[in-house]
Amino acid sequence: MTSNANAAAKLAARIVAALLARTPRLVLGLPTGRTTIPFYRSLVALHQRGEADFAQATTFNLDEFAGVDASHPGSYHAYMRAHLFDRVNLAPERIHLPRGDARDWRAEIARYERTLADAGGMDVVVLGIGRNGHVGFNEPAERLDARTHRVKLHAASRRANAYLFGRRTRAVPAYAISMGLATILDARLVLLLATGPDKARIVARALAGPITTRVPASLVRLHPAGVAVLDRAAAARLPANVTAQ
């Protein structure tokens, strides 16, 4: 547990930089969202100081809005270019995101899973957590899709992403393409990053409550190599016997 959000972001970035130093050909799963902006800022700072080299790394993003092309300013393609891809030495051909504007979304999810498998799977996946407990766009449900799939977004998820669409919730696409929980948990290391008091309740449910598809982030606890990086505010409701970085 760190003292504040910036410290948590820096710690998560240092973990990723250390993995890159150890494994230059790292296959890295990446999230989006407001929580991860300071994380990407810290990664870029490490790169600028020569402490994070992405030259041989490969990235796979967790999700993308359906019906949105890569040039759309609200797309996760645009988000990633702004916060990471255009600011480090990642080779364009090693960057992978779902194609939100694919005409055949079923073919697209199969292609994305196949491309990830061809890369050898993810060495590490970084996750945020939504206020309703989603990771990627795996929304709370009675059952969850194991692999990359098309998902209808909950109202809370659309509201959380309105900042990308002129603060207009109605402009946020109703569907997204997302890695499934099995795809995510196939990564060799899972790194969950959560900060701020607004995440305290769901962090407590995910890390100390029942493991349930109604709180998708709770399934991260099934992973043998899962690490939660939290700031003090996000960890405030955790019982004393639950440990996190």
Image (spheres, rainbow, N blue to C red):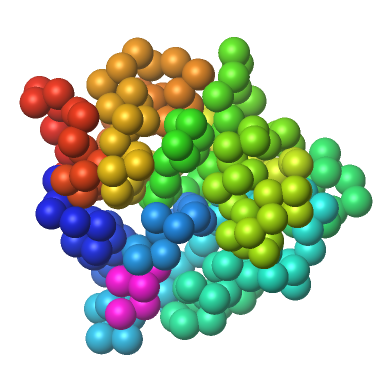
Compared to 110, does 210 lie above or below?
above
Q: Nearer the viewer, residue 8 or 232?
A: 232
Main structural element of the magenta stretch: helix, strand or loop? helix
Q: Nearer the viewer, residue 144 or 29?
A: 144
Q: Nearer the viewer, residue 70 or 95?
A: 70
Q: Is residue 142 visible?
A: yes
Residue at (35% x, 66% y) in the render? 38
Which picture quadrant has residue 159? top right
Compared to 58, does 117 lie above or below?
above
Residue at (64% x, 33% y) in the render? 154
Q: Position of residue 187 (x, y in %)?
A: 43, 41
Q: How many marks?
A: 0
Residue at (42% x, 64% y) in the render? 37
Q: Residue furthest toward the front?
A: 168
Q: Position of residue 220 (x, y in %)?
A: 38, 30
Left or right of 54? Residue 240 is left
Q: Residue furthest toward the right?
A: 103
| The magenta segment | 40-45
* Image quadrant occupied by the C terminus: top left
Q: Nearer the viewer, residue 50 or 235?
A: 235
Compared to 153, does 54 lie above or below?
below
Q: Position of residue 226 (x, y in %)?
A: 29, 37
Q: Is residue 65 visible?
A: no
Which picture quadrant has residue 22? bottom left
Compared to 113, does 39 lie above or below?
below
Q: Position of residue 241 (x, y in %)?
A: 10, 23
